[in-house]
Amino acid sequence: MKRIVILISTFLLISNIALAAGGDSGGSSSGGSGDSKTSLYKEAVSLVKRAGKLEKKEKQGKAAKLYTQAFKKLEKAYRTDKKNPDILNYMGFTSRKTGNFKDAENFYLKGLEIDPKHNGINEYLGELYVQTDRMDKAKERLEVLKNCNCEEYQELELIIKTRGTKIY
């Protein structure tokens, strides 16, 4: 059992070192390769997921720090990839999660300029509208998602129906 724990620990350590090295070398290249954009984005998404887990454990302060770190990585990724709605979606999400509703809305709207039917952006923008008590706009986002047959529609619909309950 002790050997298994040591093996797993060693593997995780090596994996983390490899990921960190990949992110650093990609970020320092002057060519702005696709790999560095992808790794910044993936690192940010990983931070967002960790922050979400902390939120569920009611560790809001720690979650906010991770959302802020994720935003900084997304900002760097966006500088080299301004046509990626997924980056803008997460920039909006991390801004919303740290209480920057105006910035969040702007990022979501920029993302919709690129891809008006982006399921994630439409859902999260709808959630933002619920949070800021603009139910008519939230319902507009729900209408955009109506025919997608996707979980984003179901989640936004539930949030709108239970708007008094904070589940976003």
Image (cartoon, rainbow, N blue to C red):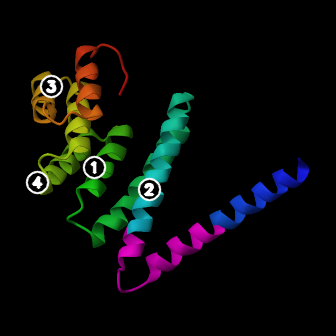
Residue at the (48%, 38%) spot, across then down:
52
Circle 1 residue = 89
Dot 2 crowding, Cα within 10 Å, few <14, some 14–19, many 20+? many
Observer-nearest of 11 and 101: 11
Circle 4 residue = 113
Q: Residue furthest bottom?
A: 30
Q: Are marks 1 and 2 in contact (CB under 8 Å)?
A: no
On screen, 97 above or below 11?
above
What amino acid type should be assigned to the residue bearing mark 1?
Asn
In the image, is 115 to the left or to the right of 152? left
Residue at the (14%, 45%) spot, across then down:
117
| Mark in front: 3 vs 2 | 2
Q: Which mark is residue 44?
A: 2
Badge 1 marks a residue whose secondary structure is: helix
Q: Main secondary structure of the magenta part?
A: helix
Does label 4 or label 2 sit earlier along the sequence?
A: 2
Q: Position of residue 86 (x, y in %)?
A: 28, 54
Badge 4 marks a residue whose secondary structure is: helix
Residue at the (50%, 42%) spot, across then down:
51
In the image, is 47 to the left or to the right of 86? right
